[in-house]
Image (cartoon, coloured by chain):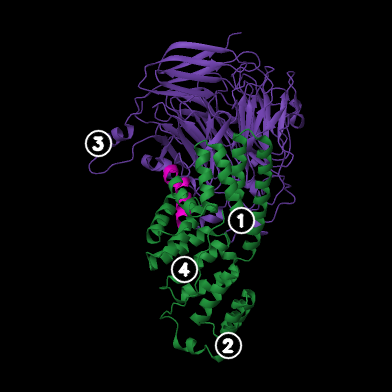
Amino acid sequence: MTRPACALAIVVASCAAVDAASQTAASSSVRELMQTARGQMQRGDPAGAVESLRTARTLAPNSEEVLAALAQVALAARMPLVAITTLDGLTRLCPGVAQYPYLLGVALMQAGDMAAAIESLQQADRLEPERALTLLALGLALNNRKHYDEARGALRHAVDLEPENIDGLAALAEAEAGAGDLTRAEEHSRRVLGQSSTHGTANFVMGLVLMRRERYAEARDALGAAIAAAPDSAAAYYQLSLAYARLGDDANARRHVELYQQKLREAEERIKSLRSVVPRERRP
Amino acid sequence: MRRAIVSALAAAAVATTAGTQPAPTLFRDVTTEAGIGFLHHAAPEKKYIVESMSGGVALFDYDNDGLVDIYFVDSLTVDTAKTPTAARSALYHNVGKGRFEDVTDKAGVAHPGWGMGVCTADVDADGWDDFYVTALGKNRLYRNNHDGTFSDIAERSGVAAAGWSAGCGFADYDRDGRLDLFVSRYVKIDLNRLPEFGRDKTCQYRGIAVQCGPRGLPGESDFLFHNDGNGRFTDVSKQAGVSDPNGYFGLGVAWFDYNADGWPDLYVANDSTPNFLYRNNGDRTFKEVAFPAGVAVSEDGAEQGSMGVALGDYLNKGALGLFVTNFSEEYNALYRHDGDHFTDVSFASKTAPSSLPFVGWGTAFFDYDNDGLLDLLVVNGHVYPQLEKARLGPSAGYRQRKLLYHNRGDGTFDEVAGQFGRVMTDERVGRGLAVGDLDNDGRLDVVVNNLDGSPEVLHNELASRGSWVIVKLAGSGGNTDAIGAMVTARAGAFMQTQVVQSGASYISQNDMRLHFGLGRATELDALDVKWPNGTVTTRHKVKANQIIRIEQPR
């Protein structure tokens, strides 16, 4: 399913490791480049902003401010290679700052390396516990890896911290469905759908729950809604094909297997192109 | 039905030790004391996929002395490919009292080439089991000469095949009374033009250079050979609709009549591609229905790296569930049989989470504690020895422990390998796995063929008081082992169904006799045998703790 975007407010968490010399290296030309990058972001040119910040980085390679800006702009521009390499450096430079392993985790999720993302997000959680965003990202990554019991713990905590976060609640429902707790998964999905009837993850989870309850017609409708919200979801197409098969609609079952396979191939292509830009040592 | 065996054993251990609690004994590794000296050969670095996939193991009574014998399949390596004698598969004759004798040379079955898997059947219906060995190159059909020797008749029977064969299984798919043969094939490989180790992205694993494949390499089609009854088989793969023209990477094979229409259907585990479920149309053709049946891919639609297959009525409802072992970071899939389709209950059954770090291969449903519920065993081991030096993330390393699942009786399992000591938790590179009762004591033993080095013969020594029955079927006509027969045991509320299978697990062969754990029951109310031709034989009031032979009426 399409994952809810995690908010990426640009944060510079000044860390003691950054020496004064490198801070002073943020000369006026660096300031200008950062100002340019801000303008480029405002104009909707994240690629341009990344270039400006890369230039700034060559002038001030140890400036936390420059590196943090570059990482976050790269994330926003969906340039995971730049984000990951920058954040790898930042986490080494500022090992006590939770924001950087958090961002690194998000970048790794973007790049499809959930195993590494989990490690990084767990590190962020250790450094700054009780942070809903970190727990949500961790839960999403754990769900992706089918570590549903662990995901449940993280997401329950995230939802406790931010009860109104429907993305967190939907992710929790997904973990519950994965772990086989259909009652809670249904309850939480329904709560999300009560607030947002088109929510992709919640509809998908409802589809899964209804399939397991052998309520195939309702499952078909929920999965159709999930696909409307997330048209790239191979999993939803696959489950919808099963719903049609159980309903005896062989033609639609076949058609949705074909659509599922098409989505699967598209997803593989996306992952392949993402991995081609991920550093070799971090390749999943 | 279920006893508190583990508690009792723990209590006994406390009583006999001072302050320490040794793990209760379930299996004891008797490989060496049994006289098993077989070693499976494999290149240390496994630079090519063809060096990672062997080998199977078969449990069958080749000399009809009532004791199950063992055949281990060995493989060559790229370096030894031109020296077929560099690999030595081995036949061990069970001489009783826990001892085996290496009779390989006398039997003439040492060198089947670059061996992969094995399945058994009495192909010529003479009352003596023959066996088929898959290989890279020519496969072998070893006909039993009734004197402790075998003759390879694959070429003249028309089943030598070619390419890279992996799984196999015999069944009478057209119910003409003769056993036919399905052979799954894996990757197209040319030993003179091997894909270069670490060549590109498909030959890297988390940034480490590894062997290439199967993704990125061309796959092989599969074979169905029809038994013509004159010692000859004919390749009918295409007309039957099971040829796999797209070349999915075929491995484990399981024949069973999933829709109970009397015609054997066929499941094929494919690596990194969707699995097949071929529904027998009853007219010598099949329809591939894995997707609508829900057994092609994982619950979220991912194509898994499937290796081995086990069938078992783990819910005691008369329906065979399907368990498929998969690559690491995927999950081993348990499919509950729900009439005309299956439901993925891997996570609901609690078998999936523990399987995520492991690459699963051989697997079997079996009632190790005779409590009347089928438990589950999986042997694991990675394909990349390069992981030995670089254990990455949550995945297990190259050598991996076994997974043993104890059936709780409510559709869920507990993973209990850790309770039974090093024999279960020592890390090996498991491949083939077969289950059978080697000493006819009513407790199921396990034999594992490991890729690197020595196998494991695991003798079941659980102090279980659960009773049991072993059923040996004698079929009529051309199917003397009654392959495909379904046997249902009933005792009060207890009911369990099993099927006689040729080919199972990961490219291996279980003891074809059917073992039923019975818990406290002292006799069965009834034992129903549904023979492959559809007729039914019922035995009433069958005493527990015996091996019962049932003959098919002529």
Residue underneath mark 1: B210
Q: Amino acid at mark 3?
A: Thr
Q: Which mark is residue B16?
A: 3
Query: Looking at the image, is mark 4 or mark 2 nearer the viewer?
Result: 2
Q: Amino acid at mark 4?
A: Pro
Q: Callout 1: few (<14), some (14-19), or many (20+) C-alpha neighbours within 10 Å?
A: many
Q: CA distance from mark 1 to mark 3?
A: 49 Å
- Provide the residue span drawn in magenta: A168-185
Q: CA distance from mark 2 to mark 3?
A: 79 Å
Compared to A134, does B240 lie above or below?
A: above
Chain of the residue under label 2: A
Indicate whether residue A136 is drawn in magenta. no
| Residue occupying the point 63% across, 32% down | A248
Chain of the residue under label 1: B
Describe the element under mark 1 as helix, strand or loop. Answer: loop
Query: Looking at the image, is mark 1 or mark 3 nearer the viewer?
Result: 1
Q: Callout 4: few (<14), some (14-19), or many (20+) C-alpha neighbours within 10 Å?
A: many
Q: CA distance from mark 1 to mark 4?
A: 29 Å
Q: Are marks 1 and 4 on the same chain?
A: no
Q: Are marks 1 and 2 on the same chain?
A: no
